Image (tube, coloured by chain):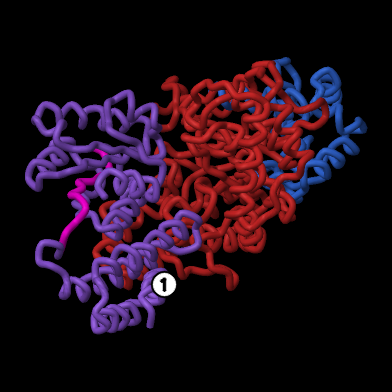
Chain colours: A red, B purple, C blue
Amino acid sequence: MKKHLTRRGDGALIEMTSEEIMIALEAGTEDAADRGKIAPLSKDDLECLLDIFMDTNRVVSVAHGEEVVVTHDIGTLRLMGDQGNSGVGIPLSRLQGIQVHERAFCSDTMELGHIDYSFKPVKPVIAMEQQEMESALLSTIIPLFYGAMPNLGTYYSPDGPFGNPSDLLPAGKVKEAYEAQESAVEHATRDMVYVGQKLAQVGCDGINFDTTGAAGDADFKATLHAVEKLKKTTDLTVQVGMAGEFVLGMHGGLEYGGRRLAGLYCHDQVKLAEKAGADIFGPAVNTKPSKDMPWNLARAVTFVKACVEVSNIPVHVNMGMGVGGIPVFETPPIDAVSRASKAMVQIAKVDGL
Amino acid sequence: MEKAEYMEKAAQHIVDADEEAVEKLAREYLIEGFDPIEMIEKGLSEGIRKLGVLFDRGEIFLPHLIIASEAMTTAVKILEQAMPADQVGKKLAKVVIGTIEGDVHDIGKGIVATMLRVYGFEVFDLGRDVPIATFVEKAKEIGADVVGSSALMTTTMVGQKALEKALKDAGLRDNLITMLGGAATTEHWAAKIGANFWAESAGDTVMKLKEIFS
Amino acid sequence: MGMLIAHGVAAGMGGIRTAGDLVARMQMTRKMRINEARAYVATKLKISPSDLSDVYVMREVREELDIGIITSVPGCAKGIEAKARIAQLLDIEIASVNRLKNKINF
């Protein structure tokens, strides 16, 4: 039986027959359907995915005319940053980094971001961020976001004023953990709105809330409140990108618009982002390193397709290391990346990557 | 009530994190003269197993897990009153766990620690950004059966390799199991640095350790 | 960087090399889904939607409309100049352009 080259979820090259690939695709889509209580991929969709995996070319692509918008997060840290940001350590200014993305990498949008990439540390250096944004806006053409993470972790000890739920919960201090998270929501919302409004003053095109929900449901709640306020008080475009496939219930009781946040998968998350006023939503679906890529990609496409179908705003799926069917490997193989791209565009029908 | 019904109810009370109900049930069960160990193994543990699945699917949340673990502890304490002395307070194994030096991401590690406690392991959670020497000292001090480390960043993973070496240098490595996890890590990485196993999630950690220590 | 470029090659519109920035602006300012955004921009540019990511077509269109091109050509609109023309062409508000207009309307 002919074997086809594909990848394991950790990036290793493996071989699978077309029958094995189809079995993995079916299992992946069923897992997503079961967890998310959504429809599995159709037989046609699975056949299309199988074709993508059986293509012997190293790089595959969408058909002419089917291309989508490709946006970038993490600012220019990919160029200038250290390994922790998957950066390649080129000593450039942030303005140069943005221009390189515009003119050398042909990005459709770009963003400015602080070295820490969290909202809280931006507050004391906001004037510097405004100045950098102003310079970038004068000399570039593509839309410019300001990107940062809500990162509620920075509001808990040892970095912030409130007790850390990760310490309080195991100690059985459930009430205290609730209170800490509720306080952090208020403070983070205020800080994110402050940063957003300051950047709107200098003509920034949009704000990208990146890896939302990374610190649990409180993280997502603060973001939604900040989005709502920014949409009411500024002309900023707001993009909300998620950290994981469901909202981790560190609190469990937090709600937005009468909906409990913990446990929501992307097709539910997008409706709340929409309600808050977000313009673009970025779902994230985790890759399991121990499973093969057909299983992971079928699973990710199933979740994202359900999200795209219910959404009324553009959906730009997160497609980095360890999300969107892409292997958990710092420099993912391009055969895997291009297959994931193609599948998300052709089958999930995303509006952007 | 039949014994089987007690088991079902015990599991359900744990899933519901209903401490009062499971406490009452445990007392009634002892009055009936049934085997207390059986209730722990077939009733309460089944509830915990179900909770693990629900947590992994995002259907229950961390505070619920904590409250359920407290309900489990309460029920076990009551059942222990009728157990042979050598079975009381018995833990599956001693586990030292922490997020590796330089890494402050501890939500996932905290969940693993909680799940392990719920499943009957004695857990020593060293917290976040834990120096390699602290892992070694603690393992030595308590006679750890397992040392687990978490790394969420590609820059901090290297600490897990250093931990393997430090445990070897301290003469502890052959007498304990090392496990690792965290978003940046993979099975390949665990094998490469000589760790005993890699776990993909909190549920996976529990399953693998239970297989070794049950 | 390889991943970013691989996405661009596999499925990206091509930024200012083609019409990626223009389509992105319609998603951002009017919450348009991809097909609607493509159709809107194509109508404004008087080309077909499938030509939006064709560099052969778009190089000429961008040069003719003077909305900024990828290579450094002396005299072509750059930076905010190009964005001012894009705002007019697409009939959208661009905050940095409005800010400049407010500064010079004294």
Residue sitting nearer the eye, A184 or A141: A184
Tell me which amino acid carries mark 1. Answer: Glu
Which residue is at the far left?
B141
| Magenta stretch: includes residue B92 | yes
Residue sitting nearer the eye, B153 or A117: B153
Residue A119 showing in the rendered view? yes
Label 1: which secondary element: helix
Residue at 63% across / 47% down in the picture? Answer: A30
The part of the chain drawn in magenta is B89-101
Chain for numbered disc 1: B
Query: From what the image shows, is residue C93 above or below residue A194?
Result: above
Residue B17 showing in the rendered view? no
Relative to A32, C59 lies left or right: right
Residue at 48% across / 68% down in the picture? Answer: A254
Query: From what the image shows, is residue A341 above or below residue A229?
Result: above
| Magenta stretch: includes residue B41 | no
Residue position for label 1: B8
- Across and down, in percent, residue C34 comes to 77, 42
